Every structure is written in structure tokens, then in C-alpha cells.
Amino acid sequence: MPMTMAPDDTFRADVPRTPGWGAGRPLFEPNERLHVGVIDVGSNSVRFVVFDGAARSPAYFYNEKIMCALGAGLSETGRLNPKGKARALDALCRFAALARGMGLQSMMAVATAAVREAEDGPAFVEEVERTTGLSLEVIPGDEEARLSAQGVLLGWPGSYGLVCDIGGASMELADLARGQVGRRVTSPLGGLKLQEVKGGPKALSKHIAEVIGRLHEEMGGETGMRLFLVGGSWRAIARVDMHRRDWPLTVLHEYRMTPAAVAATRAYIADKDIEAMRRQLGISEDRMALVPVAVQVLDELVRVFKPKDIAVSSYGIREGMLYERMPKELRERDPLLEACRFQERRDARLPGFGETLFKFVLPLFPEADWQRRRIIEAACLLHDVNWRAHPDYRAETCVDAATRANLGGVKHEERVYIGLALLYRYSSRREGTRFDALFKLLSDADAKEAEVLGRAMRLGAMLWLGAHDAPGAFLWKPERKALTLSLENRARPLFGEVAQARLKALGQAMGAEARVVFAD
């Protein structure tokens, strides 16, 4: 008997399938940890993702994508691409076998625009279930838009803006306001469909302009919002933009572009040999083939919607499916801090000390707003997770871990800020490292602040008396440039020559005279 992997099922036979995405029990409780599998049968690719754990910012235990182009030729034939169907079925057989081998307790599987629109889509769904045991949920366009927007919320809780998800056969838009998904629409502006538009470049430009103009009206005609980009074609464009700008951090999630950058990148693509660029950037042939039409769509989106800025999201429909099943309590947590707490619990020598260290250093940053405080807290939570690295490379390992980690809710400059602070946590100097290009992403003021944070953590780490026990506190008077470390007498043995030197270095970084006092 084939196993059932429907979107609302686990593999347990005693759990009945509940149709529809708005109902059903959560997949996990806030403190439960398990692997959650998601299969996304798109118009261009078929992907299998296994999320590790029920944390608010889950890691990718497994992630595999097969470019199948199910939607190629759909506009002309009304049917799925025969070669794409064969490739997709092979991929799904593999993914079902992997799911069994991993013993997944939870599995969700959806199909989007190509299967939804093709006349042989229902037959394909039946063939998939008969062959693999996977039950595909074919979701309508507005649900695709909603789930993609919820994927953005996984990384940016409380977001405002417009989510744009482009695929092979469709493009969806959804409003976000106060962390809720509002209006949403779907359109035929998928990359594969646009390649099939007849009449040459002028006809394609006219078609794109007409559809986007209609979408703008349907979405209320608003302008000036933040534009969140979801989808592989957008990420490929962002990769090209990074290359054009010689951007030193190639993490796509939370990469920011300006409207002017989009226009510059479109011109850059038009002036380059696409195949040479593809090889240089490591983008697949199938994906790169869609970039010229996708950047034309993006250029028109920017012209019509006039976004204030543009953020690339690596989180989309698959993450939105996970978010859909998260309990409300878990949704409301900060994804960055949850990920950092998880790492601390797993890897730090003294789990729990990060919060104590955060409270210890916070008086040094009296002007920090809530956004900066969460970045400072994240650095404190991560201050000891790389202790196993060789001492000669521990500082560099910390920078790599912070800037390249799979984290949500953190901008590129904030990653670098955390990385620089952690470098100073383990090293008294930053000269001679390989991170000069990265550190240039920070303003002088932010770089100095990160140094102060790192030196404060370096001192605080010497005053351990227990995970939740801070034997002292800072008193900082910026107007007088006076820094005082007040320690309890029981901490006196901890304040030796090295600690004294670290306090002095902290004072110098702050341009202050530093002293220590002991309470009676």
C-alpha cells in the first residue's frame, strides 16, 4: 500500500486528511523538533526541501532541485511538456524514496501554475500518486500568492510591502501589511510563457506593460512600497547585480537593490554574452535562459509600482507552507534571535550565557533602537558557538559563520556588523584579515560600534560565574567619556591582568577613561 503524503497528512494512518490550507492541526508544537518535508512542483522546477526542526528560523536539512520545464509550450498546446513530465515523474520518484529513507513524519506536496492550467494536469496528478504515493495538492493562483507572501513573513515578521513571486508559467503579487497577507492576484507573466509570446521584442514589451498596468490597478494603484522578490529568476538577476557591483557578500537572501540598480543591471545583461555570464556565475542554462525576459518584467514592475527599495527573498512558497502550519506563538518570535538561541543551545560551552552577556553589554549602547538591540543580542548569543575552531582561526571562523549562516531577518550590513563584533570577541585587531571588502559595507560609525561590542564581549566572557549570573555591570557616561565596571567582591579573583588589559582596550575603543570598582 503506497504511503500518503498529502499536504494535511502525516504518515500516520489514524490522521484523516483535511482538505484546504486554512484548516488542520499545526505540524508541530513550539518546543517540538522534527524534520518537515515539502515538495513544490513548479512550472519550471521540481524541488524537495526538508526543514530541520521546528525552530522559527529552520535550517535546510536537505534541498534538491530538478529543472523540468513542465510548463514549456503550455501556451501553444494547453498540455504539460512531455519531456518535462517524464523528468518530473523521475524526480518525484526519487524524492518519495528519499522521504521514506529519512523516515519523515510530516510531508507536504503542492503543484502550481503549469499543472493547474494544463488540460492533462489532473491525469498527471493521478499518475504521480499511483507511481510514487505522493498526493499533490494543486493550489489556485491566489493561494500560491498567499503562501509565497507567508514565506516572506517567515523571514520578515510584521513586514509591509508587495511580494512578487515569478515562476515559469505565472507571476503572483500579494500585499503585506502589519504582518498579514492582503490582496493577491495572479498573472501569465511567467518566464516560460513570455518566451512564447509572438511578434518579437515590441510585442513582448507591449504585453508585459499591459499586464503589469492591469495588475497595478487590481492591487489598488499604490506606489512607494518595499518590493519583495521571490523566485529563481529574480535570484538569478540579483546574482548578476552582485557581479556588476562587485558585491563582497553573495548571500542572496536579504540582498537589496534600488530601482536605478535594476535599470543598470538590465542594460548590463543586454550588453553581455549570456552564456559566458552564465558560466562565470554558475547559473544553470535553464535558469539563465529566462533572465532576459525576467529582467524586462522587473524593469516594468519598478517603473509602474515605483518601490522605495527592493529586497530579494530566498523564502517563498515552500517556507510559506511551513509558516502555514506554525503555531501562532512560534510565528510571533524573532527568526534571527530564535536561530541564534538554537545555535547557542547546540554549540556553546555555557548555553544561556548569551542573554546574560547581552544584558551586561547593553548599557554601552544607550542610543540603540530596537532593531540595533536585536543585532547586539544576536552577536551575544553567537559569541561562543565556534569555540571548537582552532584558536589561530577562531576569529575568522566567527566572521564566516555570521556572514554566511542561514539566518532570516538580518540585512547584509547587519551580518557584517555581527561578524566584525565576533572577530573582536576573539581578536584584539582586524588588520591582516581577508575581510576588508566585507567590512567596507559598514559605515565608520557602525564599524566602531561593532568593535566596542566585540571588545565588551571579550571582557565579559572572562567573568563567567554561571550561565545566568553576571557579577557586575557597566556604568557609561557618554557626556563625560567615563566608563566604570562595577564588580561584586566575589568576582575579584576573575579580574586579573588579562581582564584589566581588556577593560583598558574597551575604554580606548570608546575614547573613554575606564576604571573598575568593587562593591563591598
Image: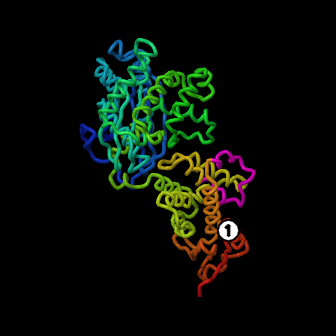
Quarter of the picture containing the C terminus is bottom right
For the residue pair 238 and 262, the one nearer the viewer reads as 262
Q: Dot 1, crowdedness within 10 Å: few (<14), some or many (≥20)? A: few
The quadrant where residue 40 appears = top left
Residue drawn at the location 61% of the way across and 51% of the way down? 442
For the residue pair 301 and 71, the one nearer the viewer reads as 301
For the residue pair 495 and 167, the one nearer the viewer reads as 167
Horizontal side of 498 relative to 314 (left or right) equals: right
In this rendering, the answer to whether 231 lies above or below 182 is: above
Residue numbers of the magenta segment:
418-440
Disc 1 target residue: 511
Q: Is residue 439 magenta?
A: yes
**Picture coordinates of residue 104, whole percent (x, y):** 40, 40
Q: Is residue 155 magenta?
A: no
Quarter of the picture containing the N terminus is top left
Instruction: Check disc 1 and report its element: helix, strand or loop.
Output: loop
In this rendering, the answer to whether 384 lies above or below 226 is: below
**Tag 1: amino acid:** Gly
The quadrant where residue 84 appears = top left
**Picture coordinates of residue 400, whole percent (x, y):** 62, 48
Horizontal side of 290 relative to 162 (left or right) equals: right
